[in-house]
Image (spheres, rainbow, N blue to C red):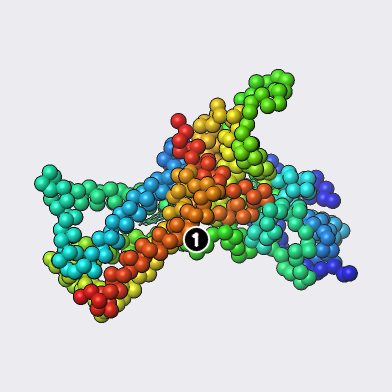
Amino acid sequence: MSGMNLTLRVWRQKGPDDEGRMATYKVEDVSPDMSFLEMLDVLNDRLIVAGDEPIAFDHDCREGICGMCGMVINGVAHGEQRATTTCQLHMRHFKDGDTITIEPWRASAFPVVKDLVVDRSAFDRIIQAGGFISVPAGSAPDAHSVPVPKDSADAAFDAATCIGCGACVAACPNGSASLFTAAKITHLGLLPQGQPERDSRAKAMVEQMDAEGFGGCTNTGECTVVCPKGISLDAIARMNRDYLSAK
Amino acid sequence: MIDRGEATDSVRPPAAHSPKKPTKPAAKTGRFTSTNGKKAVMAVTGAIMVLFLIGHVLGNLKVFSGAQSFNDYAEFLRTAGEPAVPRRTVLTLVEIVLVLAVGLHMWSAISLARRAAKARPVKYAAKRKNQAGGYATRTMRWGGVIIVLFLIWHLLDLTFGVANPAGSAGLPYDRMVQGFAPERWWVTLFYAVSLVMVGLHLRHGLWSAVQTLGLASGRTRKGLQLAAAAFSLVLVIGFLAVPFAVMIGVVK
Ligand code: HEM
Ligand code: SF4
Ligand code: FES
């Protein structure tokens, strides 16, 4: 079986200060079983052989759990496949002859480092601002020493699946980081261990989100659709509630 | 595999951003000036305006019980509270609250829209595909602008009467009937378009407000969205019933 021939329009930017531009590449003989990143690897190999600079993109686990591999594919963060990170997206979802546009996350708080790589440390600073609990350091506590209702445990776990990829920001027409921030606030706020800092956490994390230059949420719901972990808008409602009622 | 050392030769630690201290120490955002706070202001002021619209549409429907009833109702608005308080006290208070609500609502809408524009300075080259939001969600801002323009016209026309054939001296009922007279079809058209905008605005705005105030949850969200759509539809029909009734001569 012969592979697909694709045309890629890719954002190329030499560094943070470069203006950047779209460049067009042909990739031949792409196997439908390749992942999207493998397809880029193939292109990069050819670029290197041709003496060109390969396309820089972030990736690490390639199994959908680390959150490194963000790119906007044909205008949709992580591509059109739902609940899927770019690394888990397979080329069988594309057709021979397709033109695919690939861009980095676009947000002033996520400056482009190079090509498709953006600096997401704004997320780290949001976490630093309040995404923690106070724990007595020392040996691990006994299991079940603090009972957690099953519902809360499940919902907290769902929120905790956020991998910090930033797709929610990329997809949001306002460039808002609400879904990410809310996922963390929900994850910790639902658990007994998260109660002591519940108020200060909501305030500090929202303030940091604002200070980083992210936009405000207008409940468009674009984020939850592209989120590879399906974090729901419930998290944002909860963040709003915690923030507004914080003392 | 990509040798990152080579692939990223021009990568420097993004100096301007690590660790990012906002260049202008981001104006310390208080409870009401943070993004979430402004949204809450928008939700509460929006809710106040919705309460007003409910009262307004119910009052409008009085034209169907005749000129007397409608004019009496308009008079009641001015005399409410008498004799405990002077004429127009209650009405003036309501007007003040509404002006404040509109002002604060627009203030938050504008400052959040400007923040959103700054948050995405470089647009996507691929036409962004809306994955979730409908038309109502995307037209909140421009729809809001149309609503304000309409509001100004509407006040000039039917409240102050300066843009109305019956003039400011006319009775409210006459202003209504002459304002929407068939030869002024363009007024009715503008009114209809604006009200559809109001309907769309509320279709998203109503459930969005509940979400913004943190009162929505997964179980209620679908229901809320349906309720918002149903409410908006009924409201728009209620408002449009009057000018169309005048236009086709049912009310004259
Ligand atoms: C004066 C012109 C207006 C402008 C510029 C405006 C603009 C906006 C914007 C930008 C939003 C946020 C949209 C979003 O969350 O996606 C909004 C929300 C809302 N608006 Fe307006 N609007 C206007 C008038 C009105 C009026 C007259 C009403 C009520 C009758 C109203 C009711 C609401 C409600 C209930 C919300 C929801 C608040 C929320 O999202 O939390 N608005 N408006
Ligand atoms: S909420 Fe979803 S889209 Fe946003 S960072 Fe977390 S996993 Fe990624
Ligand atoms: S590379 Fe880790 S999630 Fe895609």
Q: How many marks?
A: 1
User: Would residue A36 appear left or right of A236 to someone viewing this image?
Assistant: right
Write the residue at 71% across / 23% down: A142
How packed mark 1 is, by other alpha carbons closer than 10 Å (few <14, some 14-19, many 20 or more), is some
Observer-nearest residue: A55 or B110?
B110
User: Would residue B102 appear left or right of B76 to someone viewing this image?
Assistant: right
| Residue A72 position by quadrant | bottom right
Q: Residue furthest right?
A: A1
Is residue A50 visible in the rendered image? The answer is: yes
Write the residue at 38% across / 47% down: B44
Residue identifier under label 1: B138
- Under tag 1, what secondary structure? helix
Observer-nearest residue: B229 or A160?
B229
Q: Is B245 situated above or below A201?
A: below
Q: Chain of mark 1?
A: B
Identified by mark 1, the residue type is Arg
User: Would residue A74 appear left or right of B115 to someone viewing this image?
Assistant: right
Q: Which percent across, then down, holds residue A192? A: 59, 29
Write the residue at 45% across / 30% down: A247
Q: Residue furthest left?
A: B83
Q: Is A144 situated above or below A108?
A: above
Q: Is A178 situated above or below A144?
A: below
Q: Which percent across, then down, holds residue A239? A: 53, 41
User: Would residue B110 appear left or right of B187 to someone viewing this image?
Assistant: right
Q: Is A26 situated above or below A40?
A: below
Write the residue at 29% across / 77% down: B185
